[in-house]
Image: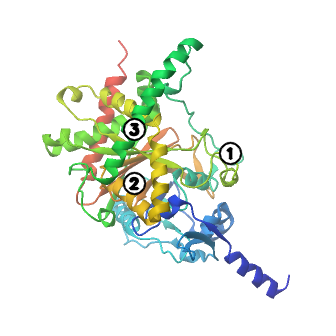
């Protein structure tokens, strides 16, 4: 192929376009611009001289979205357009003032996370950045931060993509493994006989219909007219998504979480939700007893992919015939945060049981399906900006969002740099509080993104720790001597 043909092929490659999914358009609109920060804590200093080669050979080939920008077509819709990527535009290596100890850089690193959380990704180039922080903190010798726009994909897609760049530290040739997924009690088989199952199915169907109407109606009200109360975890300020966010983390033993789960006969997600709800109420109560019963709602993200049993390869996720597809495949569940009465203060387990009951009911109703249809209708009749505005109201009218991911059991390496820890945060949401969770190497890392100057991140973190200790003490009885 001569030079002229090569230039023609390159130009043709640049013109390749693919329609952006509806949710990708909603998340990259005038109403919303949401991104995901993924933080890798490395045990050794990162050699940034390898960055360009790694991005070119490992990262860019993962998905065409990493080499595409979002453009409008002649009808006003948005398309993904392939472009040439200048990697130097996407790699940031900050310079901090000189220090003498690892603790010295903790505040600088926190401030840097706040800074990049607030910045918008330029629309003129592919919607991602890599930040290499070469200064040691108390938790790592160096950090690599991936900032990826939510329009590219949800947490499941992006986690699957990033894991394809990482290897097992013990044996890079072996595949990663993940904590076993166990279905909730609502998925257990009925062992009471076929006839009993038929008779039980009728009230379940009726109950499901009633729950669908109730849950969808409530969701519609919460997204349109009914706001949560202003509380110590919700400032209700306009433009809160443009205010500085402080990101802090806390680590729990996954084995201890599983002990609580086994003793209460619930799921890990039920336990996590119960701990967060209790911790939030403890924090609110410290600010004033009136907040113990304030109207507060959490949006719990539900992965809507079918037959989900672990991460799939990027090739599988990109296949049109595969159930577990790339993209944004999730829904919000509106979960009322239980009140904290005197009796519930001495019964933390009630927070788990209430979370389990509400989450189970909503997962089994058709409200998620109807909400999706509502967004489709808004998009068709009023355009994607109207649907994006509806999602913005949904987020702004609630008090917090909770989302979690499953991480690998084994230690990871990035180009032979061992990874001590991982966590992620969703940024750009119009909320004062966002909580994310990811498991890794037997631990559960909880990241708290809070509105700086409004939520006291250290006190909130202490409240979550206290809630965990209360829950563990109540659920895991000490053995008799």
How many other residues sit within 10 Å of disc 2, few (<14), some (14-19) or many (≥20)? few
For the C terminus, the image quarter is top left
Residue at position x 65%, y 51% in the image: 317
Give the Cα separation between the discs numbered 3 and 2: 50 Å
| In the displayed structure image, the side of residue 133 where residue 240 appears, left or right | left
* Most distant residue in the right direction: 1
Nearer the observer: mark 3 or 2; the answer is 3
Residue sitting nearer the eye, 464 or 109: 464
Give the Cα separation between the discs numbered 1 and 3: 51 Å
* Most distant residue in the bottom direction: 4
How many other residues sit within 10 Å of disc 1, few (<14), some (14-19) or many (≥20)? few
Residue at position x 24%, y 40% in the image: 281
Which residue is denoted by mark 1 in the rendering?
171
Which residue is denoted by mark 3 in the rendering?
213
The percent coordinates of residue 325 (x first, y second) are: 62, 50
* Mark earlier in primary sequence (3, 2): 2
- Note whether 55 is above or below 348 in the view shown: below
Residue at position x 57%, y 40% in the image: 409
Residue sitting nearer the eye, 67 or 98: 67
The percent coordinates of residue 279 (x first, y second) are: 28, 39
* Residue 151's disc number: none
- Per the image, label 1 sits on a secondary structure element best described as loop
Which residue is denoted by mark 2 in the rendering?
138
């Amino acid at each position: 192929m001569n030079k002229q043909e090569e230039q023609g092929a390159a130009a043709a490659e640049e013109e390749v376009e693919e329609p952006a999914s509806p949710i990708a358009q909603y998340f990259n609109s005038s109403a919303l611009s949401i991104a995901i920060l993924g933080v890798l804590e490395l045990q050794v200093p990162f050699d940034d001289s390898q960055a360009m080669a790694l991005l070119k050979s490992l990262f860019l080939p993962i998905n065409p979205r990493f080499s595409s920008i979002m453009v409008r077509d002649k009808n006003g819709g948005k398309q993904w357009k392939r472009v040439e990527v200048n990697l130097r535009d996407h790699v940031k290596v900050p310079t901090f003032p000189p220090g003498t100890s690892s603790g010295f850089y903790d505040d600088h690193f926190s401030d840097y996370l706040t800074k990049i959380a607030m910045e918008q990704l330029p629309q003129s180039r592919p919607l991602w950045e890599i930040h290499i922080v070469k200064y040691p903190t108390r938790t790592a010798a160096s950090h690599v931060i991936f900032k990826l726009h939510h329009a590219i994909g949800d947490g499941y897609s992006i986690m699957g993509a990033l894991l394809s760049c990482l290897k097992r530290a013990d044996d890079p040739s072996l595949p990663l493994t993940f904590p076993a997924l166990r279905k909730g009690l609502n998925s257990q088989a009925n062992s009471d006989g076929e006839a009993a199952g038929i008779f039980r199915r009728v009230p379940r169907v009726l109950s499901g219909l009633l729950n669908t109407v109730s849950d969808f109606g409530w969701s519609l009200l919460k997204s349109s007219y009914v706001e949560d109360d202003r509380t110590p975890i919700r400032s209700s300020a306009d433009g809160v998504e443009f205010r500085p966010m402080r990101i802090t983390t806390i680590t729990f033993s996954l084995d201890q979480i599983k002990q609580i789960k086994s003793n209460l006969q619930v799921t890990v997600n039920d336990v996590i939700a119960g701990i967060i709800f209790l911790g939030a109420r403890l924090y609110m109560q410290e600010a004033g007893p009136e907040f113990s019963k304030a109207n507060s709602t959490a949006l719990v993200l539900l992965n809507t992919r079918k037959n989900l049993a672990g991460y799939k390869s990027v090739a599988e996720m990109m296949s049109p015939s595969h159930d577990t597809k790339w993209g944004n495949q999730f829904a919000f569940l509106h979960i009322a945060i239980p009140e904290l009465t005197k009796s519930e203060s001495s019964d933390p387990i009630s927070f788990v049981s209430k979370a389990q009951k509400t989450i189970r009911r909503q997962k089994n109703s058709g409200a998620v399906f109807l909400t999706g249809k509502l967004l489709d209708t808004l998009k068709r009749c009023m355009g994607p900006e109207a649907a994006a505005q509806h999602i913005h109201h949904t987020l702004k009218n609630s008090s917090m969002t909770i989302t979690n991911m499953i991480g690998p059991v084994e230690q990871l390496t990035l180009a032979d740099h061992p990874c001590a820890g991982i966590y992620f945060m969703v940024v750009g949401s119009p909320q004062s509080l966002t909580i994310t969770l990811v498991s890794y190497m037997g631990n559960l890392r909880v990241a708290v993104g809070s509105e700086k100057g409004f939520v006291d991140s250290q006190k909130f973190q202490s409240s979550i720790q206290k809630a965990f200790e209360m829950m563990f003490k109540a659920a895991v009885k000490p053995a008799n001597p």
